[in-house]
Image (cartoon, rainbow, N blue to C red):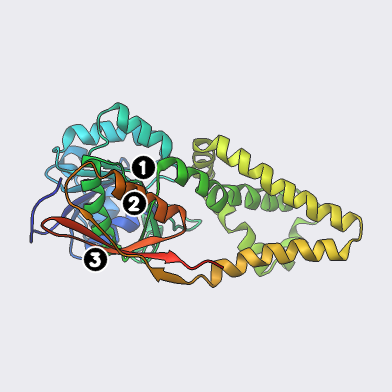
Amino acid sequence: MVDRPGARVRAAVVGTGLIGGSVLLRMHGAGVDVTGWDPDEATRREARRIGVPAPDRLVEAVADRDVVFLCGPLPTLPATLVEVAAMTGERCVLTDVGSTKEEVAEFAATQGLTHRFVPGHPMAGTDRAGLTAAGPDLLTGAAWVLCPAAGAATTAFRWLAGLLVDVFEARVVPMSAAEHDSAAALASHVPHLLAGALAGAVQRAPLRDAILALAAGSFSDGTRVAGTPADRTANMLLGNRDRVLRELTEVTAFLDDLAAALRAGDAPALTARYDEARASRAALRGRRFDADDRRFPLDGDHTAEVSWLRGLGVAGGHLSGLHVGVETVSYAARRPVAD
């Protein structure tokens, strides 16, 4: 993988919408030698207007780069991955920012690209779209999932994780692609269904305008992601369909419990269910972490290293730093304290 000690990192971002544009702007502001490319000519012009190199030809944007971030729509990722891989050298690390991981990881494996493709997903966003909605601070400090694989792929993971910590102050969450998709179904994807259902019901309601006049924080917070461009939401949900439907069943079961208690006028049951829900909310706001630093041999098959990394992510932990030495790699990690 990349081995240019002391040299300035050379990066490219392919697809400069909200997330890709935010990656681009942050790296540019951090002094990284970065180029952007988007299939939309107006978007390329906008990138150049704000001072970021954006060639008209994809091959010019990705040539001689150390890392390329693939940030286009989910359905385009497989084709773009193959195209960019053919335009870049074997030591160029490739990653993506898509909201589902297993399908693209499996595709990369069939193409023989696992050794330099690290599936990724920064857990941040807004309900807006496009480069004009992007900002250099959107991803700062975000939980950023990376999916490490054993063997040569671990080298790519280490390098990319270090870059994300250094440039984005990211909390790198290492997980397998399947574990990511299972966790993201309930953490991110089902909320889009719930927000869409609530906002859609209001749109159809006879008193729509009166409801919107009364809507305050609970409605606004609960429906924020319903403002996301519809095609982007549809691509995300379809890309993780089976897991989303499975988790939706669990959500509707809890909703049925609430409705049953309400129909029965059962205040203790209703209170108990909301106490349960409130505990989850409190855990989100009040999490505490302990250090869990580890060191592994630099060479080898990396099986134990990857197993520990994935276990850290599944436990709710993250990497806050790492150092690659002559013979070992040292991880600075944080693991949540049990409730």
| Left-right relation of 133 to 194 | left
Q: Residue at x 28, y 41 (%)?
A: 150
Between 219 and 251, the residue placed more toward the observer is: 251
Q: Which numbered disc, 2 or 3, marks the residue that appears first in the sequence? A: 2
What crowding class fits label 1: few (fewer than 14 Cα within 10 Å), some (14-19), or many (20 or more)?
Answer: many
Quadrant in the rendering for residue 39: top left
Q: Secondary structure at mark 2?
A: helix
Mark 1 lies on residue? 72
**Amino acid type assigned to the residue bearing label 3 in the image:** Gly
Q: Which numbered disc, 1 or 3, marks the residue that appears first in the sequence? A: 3
Q: Are marks 2 and 1 in contact (CB under 8 Å)?
A: yes
Q: Can the viewer see residue 113?
A: yes
**Amino acid type assigned to the residue bearing label 1 in the image:** Gly
Quadrant of image for the N terminus: top left
What crowding class fits label 3: few (fewer than 14 Cα within 10 Å), some (14-19), or many (20 or more)?
Answer: some
**C-alpha separation, residue under disc 2 versus residue under disc 1:** 8 Å
Mark 3 lies on residue? 29
Between 66 and 128, the residue placed more toward the observer is: 66
Mark 2 lies on residue? 20
Between 46 and 103, the residue placed more toward the observer is: 103
Tally the marks. 3
Instruction: Give how far across and how far down residue 81 sits, in percent.
Output: 29, 35
What crowding class fits label 2: few (fewer than 14 Cα within 10 Å), some (14-19), or many (20 or more)?
Answer: many
Q: Which numbered disc, 2 or 1, marks the residue that appears first in the sequence? A: 2
Quadrant of image for the C terminus: bottom right
Q: Residue at x 83, y 61 (%)?
A: 269
Quadrant in the rendering for residue 78: top left
**Amino acid type assigned to the residue bearing label 2 in the image:** Gly
Q: Secondary structure at mark 1?
A: loop
Instruction: Give how far across and how far down residue 301 sits, in percent.
Output: 23, 41
Tell me: residue 227, above or below residue 89.
Answer: below
Q: Residue at x 62, y 39 (%)?
A: 246
